[in-house]
Amino acid sequence: MNDTAMIWLARGLGAAAGSAISLAYILPRGRREAAVRFAVGLVSGVVFGGGVGLKIAGELGLGADLAQFELMLMGSAAASLCAWWALGFLMRLFERGTKPTNTSEAQ
């Protein structure tokens, strides 16, 4: 397998692992939420995995010690997991704002 294919494999595996961990960490309320969270995590891991991997390696001083595959795998998993936290936070925030309030108690 050539280097490009290995990098894409690492992106996909890391993104899928991050999404799976996020679903297992706090269970979704239903199938729709699980599908949305998994899809957002997968896309975010594939798109942002390279940059996140480089940033983490730079902050920890691991850039020279890790192979490209490992950097991409780590970055994709972290980006995927972080995307879920942001999405989960926003979904719960919007759910609170849309719940009807009892106006008779306010009077």
Image (tube, rainbow, N blue to C red):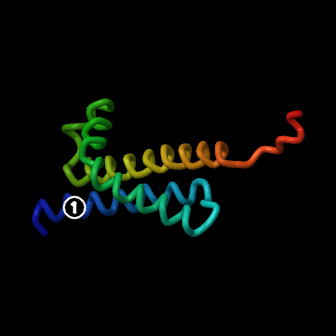
The residue positioned 45% from the left and 58% from the top of the image is 19
Quarter of image, res 105: top right
Which x, y percent locates residue 42? 37, 59
Q: What residue is disc 1 on?
A: 8
SS for callout 1? helix
Residue 87 locus on image (x, y percent): 49, 48
Q: Residue at x 39, y 62 (%)?
A: 16
The structure residue drawn at horizontal position 19% and vertical position 62%, both measured from the top left corner, is 6
Label 1 neighbour load within 10 Å: few <14, some 14-19, many 20+: some
| Closest to the observer, 97 or 88 | 97
Q: Residue at x 55, y 61 (%)?
A: 33
Report the label total. Answer: 1
Choose top left, top right, bottom left or bottom right for residue 46. bottom left
101 sits left or right of 31 in the view:
right
Q: Amino acid at mark 1?
A: Trp
**Is 55 located above or below residue 38 in the figure?**
above
User: Where's residue 96, x and y in %?
Assistant: 67, 44
Q: Give x and y (percent) for residue 39.
A: 41, 62
Residues 68 and 34: in front is: 34
Position of the N terminus, as image quadrant, is bottom left
Query: Which of 34/11 is in front?
Result: 34
